[in-house]
């Protein structure tokens, strides 16, 4: 089930609660329950466990509870489901064994960890890692622009180092329901203990600023051709949050289109996976591919 953020950027686990309540209401021992939705550390043990114990479940005896984060990457054909290792953390050792037994029927490798909290944090760390490194690449692009150097050329040169470096590339921001959302589950949880996750907030600030940067680049490109943004016709190639998918949740492309409209540009888009999209209350339909070829 989804785990979005509220407008305050606090976790919204109402979908997890609703699903868990339905499962708990139908509890029939012995039963294995595994949560896969990305969530803050402690959800499995502190929220789900009491729901079942209130109905007579004895964890590790007639009830087995674990967390195993989803690791699917939509449109990534390089890794099939069976090839992606599964991290599993149970409330007890017996819970871990039961969940691991289940997943070994599906995937080639299962990583058993000591608790659900470790598994929950592992998934959050994966996405925080990506979020922060994308932000670094984005800020690096801003610096390279001021230094009049090609960002991609620099990153390509750095990526020739066979160790100690992993290339990340700049873009218009971040989107989707994971990378830009999940870090705030960790930030919220750790704030309860009096600690502020500064990297997470800084990365979000940088990534959220990138649509403005993209619009500036468009305006500069037009200026070089002695044209202004106001009245220009701009075609966006792709509006989903990543290539190969039709998911527009949190897509920075929508913000870019909105900003371009605000500056007087006439906008259109082409995306074979997104037939239509609403921008500022206006429904836009995708430009057919045959009209894009050759432009």
Image: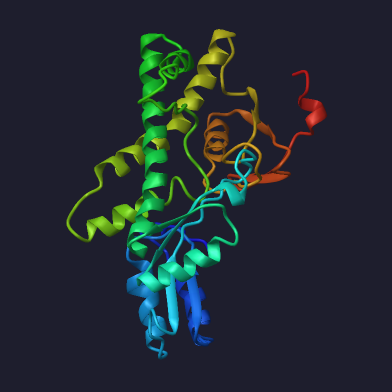
User: Where is residue 171 drawn, in percent x and y?
Assistant: 49, 29
* Vertical order, 223 against 94 (above or below): above
Q: Is 265 displayed left or right of 62 in the figure?
A: right
Q: Residue furthest bottom?
A: 56
Query: What residue lies at 30% left-to-right and 52% top-to-bottom?
Result: 187
Up the image or down, 150 lies above or below 275; here it is above
Position of residue 239 in the picture relative to residue 184 (left or right): right
Q: Residue at x 41, y 67 (%)?
A: 96
Residue at (51% x, 15% y) in the render: 220
Position of 77 compared to 178: left or right? Answer: right
Give the image quarter of residue 6: bottom left
Residue 196 or 285: which is nearer the viewer? 196
Can residue 295 be seen from the camera position used here? yes
Residue drawn at (65%, 43%) of the image: 245
Quadrant in which the C terminus is drawn = top right
Residue 20 in the image: state x and y as whole percent. Answer: 48, 76
Answer yes or no: is residue 35 visible.
no
- Point out the residue furthest to the right here: 290
Q: Residue 97 location in percent, x, y?
A: 44, 68
Classify 11 as above or below 272.
below
């Amino acid at each position: 089930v989804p785990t979005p953020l509220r407008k305050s950027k606090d976790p919204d686990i109402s979908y997890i609660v609703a699903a868990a309540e339905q499962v708990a209401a139908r509890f029939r021992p012995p039963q294995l329950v595994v949560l896969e939705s990305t969530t803050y550390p402690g959800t499995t043990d502190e929220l789900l466990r009491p729901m079942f114990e209130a109905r007579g479940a004895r964890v590790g005896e007639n009830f087995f509870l674990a967390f195993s984060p989803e690791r699917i990457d939509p449109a990534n054909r390089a890794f099939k489901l069976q090839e992606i290792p599964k991290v599993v953390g149970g409330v007890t050792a017996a819970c871990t064994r039961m969940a691991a037994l289940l997943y070994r029927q599906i995937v080639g490798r299962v990583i058993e960890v000591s608790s659900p909290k470790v598994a929950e944090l592992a998934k959050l760390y994966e996405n925080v890692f990506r979020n922060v490194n994308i932000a670094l690449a984005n800020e690096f692009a801003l610096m390279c622009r001021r230094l009049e150097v090609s960002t991609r050329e620099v990153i390509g040169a750095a990526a020739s180092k066979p160790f100690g470096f992993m290339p990340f590339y700049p873009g218009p921001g971040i989107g989707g329901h994971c990378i830009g959302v999940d870090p705030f589950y960790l930030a919220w949880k750790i704030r309860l203990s009096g600690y502020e996750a500064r990297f997470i907030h800084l990365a979000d600030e940088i990534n959220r600023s990138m649509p403005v940067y993209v619009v500036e680049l468009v305006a500069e490109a037009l200026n070089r051709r002695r044209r202004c943004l106001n009245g220009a016709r701009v075609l966006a190639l792709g509006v989903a949050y990543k290539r190969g998918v039709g998911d527009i949740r949190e897509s920075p492309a929508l913000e870019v289109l909105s900003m371009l409209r605000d500056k007087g540009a006439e906008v259109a888009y082409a995306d074979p996976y997104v037939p239509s999209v609403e921008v500022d209350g206006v429904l836009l339909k995708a430009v057919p591919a045959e009209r894009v070829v050759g432009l």
